[in-house]
Image: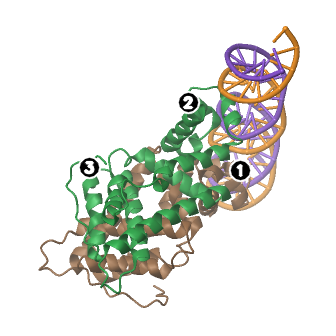
Chain colours: A brown, B green, C orange, D purple
Amino acid sequence: MRKRELIEAGIRCLGNGGISAFTIDNICREAQVSRGLINHHFRTKEDLLLQIYAAMTAHLVESFPSEVAEHVLRHVIDSNFDASTFRRSNLRAWLTVWGEIATNAELRVLHEQRYQNYKARIARALAAFVRRDDPGFEAESLARQLIAMIDGLWLEYCLHAEDFSLEDARHDCYRLLHSQGVALRVPGSGDRGD
Amino acid sequence: MRKRELIEAGIRCLGNGGISAFTIDNICREAQVSRGLINHHFRTKEDLLLQIYAAMTAHLVESFPSEVAEHVLRHVIDSNFDASTFRRSNLRAWLTVWGEIATNAELRVLHEQRYQNYKARIARALAAFVRRDDPGFEAESLARQLIAMIDGLWLEYCLHAEDFSLEDARHDCYRLLHSQGVALRVPGSGDRGD
DNA sequence: CACCTTGTTGTACGATCGTTCAACAAGAAA
DNA sequence: TTTCTTGTTGAACGATCGTACAACAAGGTG
C-alpha cells in the first residue's frame, strides 16, 4: 500500500531532520513517488502527520503479548530500551510530534487518548503486582514516574550515547520500581525476543 | 542592547511555534525591529540559534547561590519546578533545540559542554552529601537518573498539565534521591525565594 | 567641513514551501 | 467498445523562506 509507504517515509524525514525536513518534496523523494501523490492519499499535510503519530503509537494500543502484570511491566521497559527503537532518529521524530502537539489540536486529542491509555495500563499492572498489604502504594504516581524516567533516559541517551549503555538505562527503570516496593525480577541482559 | 532583545524574541518564537516559527520575519516582528537587523547583529540564523541556546543554558553555568552540597541539590530540583520556568512554552523551546542538536554541529558541541558540566556538578554534590560508609553508591549514575526524571516529568507535565501538580513532580525527584540513600530534607511547599 | 564607523531600514533575489489541477494509465462496470 | 473510478504524475500558483545589499541617520575624528 502506497499510504503505508508515505507514512513510513514521513517518519524517516521527521527522524532525520525534524519538522523542517517534513516537506512534501522530501517525503515524496524519500518514498520515491511523485510530488502530487501525498495530496491524493492525504487531505493535507497535517492529516499525514496525524496518521504518522497514530502509526508511531500503534504499539502502545495493540494488546501486549501477555496480560500478566509482571510481563506487562517488563515489556514496557524492555521494548523501550531495545536496540531497534532506542535510536537518535527515533528520538527526533518524538521530539517533533511532542512539539507539534502544542499547536495542533487534533494531534493533541489523539496524544491525550494514547497517553492516558498507556499510563492506565501501567498503573493497573503496578497495582496488580504490588502486594496488597502496602497501604501507601500509589500506582498512578509510580506509573507517571516510570514514564518520565523512560522518556528522560531516552533523551539523555540519544543526546549523549557515550555516557551510559542501554543496559544501564534499563536497570535504572527496574531500580526505580524496586525502590518503591515493586519487586520485579530484572531479566538477564540477553535479548528477549518477544 | 538590541542583540539581547533579538535573542529573547527568538526564544519566544521557538517556545510558541517551534522551529517553524523561528523565521527572520517572525523574530523581527516579535522584537519590533526591521527585517534586516538580524543579519547585522548575527552572521546567520544558525548563529542566532547558537546564542539563544547559550542564553537558555546560562543559569546552568553561572555559579549557584551556594556550593553546599545540600543547597546545590535542592536548587537543581526546585529551580526546575518553579512556576516561572515550568511552562509549556519553555518546553517547546527545549524540544526544538534538542532536536536541532542532531543536525547542528556547533550546537551539539555547546550542548555537550553544558550537559557534562551540569551532570558533574550534580554528581559532585551527591557524592559529598551521601555518607562515606556506603560502598555501592554511584554518584554518576544517580545524577543521570535525576536529570532524566526532571526532564521526563517536565515533558509529561507540559503535555498533560491536569494530571499532576508541580509539587507532585518536585516530590518525585526528592523521593528518587531518598530511595537511593540521599537523605535530602524535602523543603516545604512554599516559595523559597533564593 | 570631509570621512569613517555603526546601527537600522526596507527592498530585491532565487529557492522552496503547500496546495491545486489538468492529464493520463489501468482496470472494472456497463 | 464506452464509461467510470482510482492511482499517479508533473506543472503551475501565490506565499514565504534566508540572505545580500543599497540607502540613510547619527556620532566621532581628522
Front tag of 3 and 1: 3
The residue beneath circle 1 is: A25
Which residue is tagged 3? Answer: B192
Q: Residues within 10 Å of mark 1 (few under 14, many from 20)?
A: some
Q: Which residue is mark 2?
A: B31
In percent of the image, x 25 and y 47: which residue is there? Answer: B191
Q: Relative to B161, is B48 on the left or the right?
A: right
Closer to us: B44 or C30: B44
Q: Please, what secondary structure does the residue beneath circle 1 have? A: helix
CA neighbours of label 3 inside 10 A, class few (<14), some (14 to 19), many (20+): few
Image coordinates for residue A80, horizontal then vertical, percent: 45, 74
Residue type pointed to by label 3 = Arg
Is residue B138 at least partly visible in the picture? Answer: yes
User: Which one is in front in this view, the residue at disc 1 or the one at disc 2?
Assistant: 2
Q: Position of residue A147 (x, y in %)?
A: 37, 67
| Type of the residue with mark 1 | Asp
Task: For mark 2, name the chain.
Answer: B
Asked whether residue A68 appears in the rendered view, the answer is no
Q: Which mark is residue B68?
A: none
Question: Tag 3, which secondary structure?
Answer: loop
Q: Is residue C29 above or below residue A104?
A: below
